[in-house]
Amino acid sequence: MSDKTVHSDSAFMARRDAARDRIDALTGAKGGAADDRLAWFHTVYREAGGDPAAVPWADLAPKQAIVDWLAENPGNGKRAIDIGCGLGDNAEALAAAGYKTEAFDLSEDAILWAQKRFPDSFVSYRAADLFQLPSEWLAAFDLVQECYTIQALDGDLRTKAIEVMAGLVAPGGQLLLINRSQDETGAAKGPPWPMKPSEWQRFETFGLTMVREEFYEIERPGRIIPHVRAVFFRKW
Ligand SMILES: C[S@@+](CC[C@H](N)C(=O)[O-])C[C@H]1O[C@@H](n2cnc3c(N)ncnc32)[C@H](O)[C@@H]1O
C-alpha cells in the first residue's frame, strides 16, 4: 500500500519539521500522566492556528489501507464510527463508501476544523472523549474504525482504549484496526508506540474474533514503517 499525501510536498514538510520542535517540547508530548497526554492533543490542535502542517499526523487524505478495505467492504447504509477522527479524512472515506458515519475526537478544535474542511459532509462529527462516551454508543456500530489512536496512547490509556473500542461493536459488526506495528520483542521508542500482536489480540478478550490480519510497510525518507491492518468480528 502506498500513500502520496502531504509527505511529498517539501514546503509543507518543512513547516511540519519546524512545528515538531515546538510540539515535542510541550508537557505530555512524550506520554506520561494520562491528563497531560490528553491535554497535549488539545494543545496541538489549538496552537496549530489552522495550519495542518502543525498537526503531525494530518495527511489531508484518507489512509490508503482504509480506502482499499472499503472498496471491498461498502457500507450500504450500515452504521460506522471513526475514533479519534482528527481532521476527518478517514471519516469522509467511510461516508463515501456508503456508511452512515459518526466521527469523534477529543479536541473540539479538531472537530470544528473537520467541519470547516468538509462543509457538505454527510458525517456526523462531535467532540467526545473515548473514555467518557455516550452510553447509547455501546454495541451500536456495524463498523468501528480505529486508525493511529491506540499507537498515540501509552500506559493505562492504551490498555483501556482497546476495551472501550471493542465495546462499540454491535453484534454482527466489525472493527477495522490500522496502526504501526512491531513484533513481540520490539522496543520502539514512542510516541507513536507501535502495537505488538499481543496488544491487538486483546480485542479477542472483549468478545471479538480476529478474521483478518495483514502486515504492510509505509516508506518515509530514510525509513520504512511497519503497519498492521486487522479486522475483528463480533458474533453476538
Ligand atoms: C494520531 S491521531 C490520528 C488521527 C486520525 N485517526 C488519523 O488516522 O489520522 C490520534 C487522534 O486521537 C485523538 N484522541 C486522543 N485521545 C483521545 C480520546 N481520549 N478521545 C477521543 N479522541 C482522542 C487525538 O486528538 C487525535 O486526533
Image: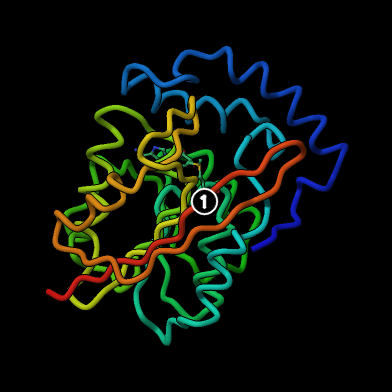
As helix, strand or loop, the secondary structure at mark 1 comes to: strand
Q: Residue shown at 51%/73% (left/top)?
A: 69
Residue 55 drawn at (x, y percent): 63, 35
Instruction: Tell me if residue 42 comes above or below residue 207 in the rendering.
Output: above
Image side of residue 5 versus residue 82, left or right = right
Q: Nearer the viewer, residue 203 or 49?
A: 203
Specify the quadrant of the image occupied by residue 161.
top left
Q: How many marks?
A: 1
On-image quarter of the N terminus: bottom right
Image side of residue 39 versus residue 61, left or right = left
Q: Tag 1: residue type? A: His
Image side of residue 168 versus residue 122, left or right = left
Q: Residue shown at 43%/47% (left/top)?
A: 84
* Protein image colouring: rainbow
Classify 10 Å Cα crowding around label 1: few (below 14), some (14-19), many (20 and above).
some
Q: Residue shown at 49%/45% (left/top)?
A: 180
On-image quarter of the C terminus: bottom left
Residue 95 drawn at (x, y percent): 51, 73
Q: Residue shown at 26%/47% (left/top)?
A: 162
Image side of residue 183 versus residue 57, left or right = left
Residue 18 drawn at (x, y percent): 76, 22
Q: Which residue is mark 1?
A: 227
Specify the quadrant of the image occupied by residue 146.
bottom left
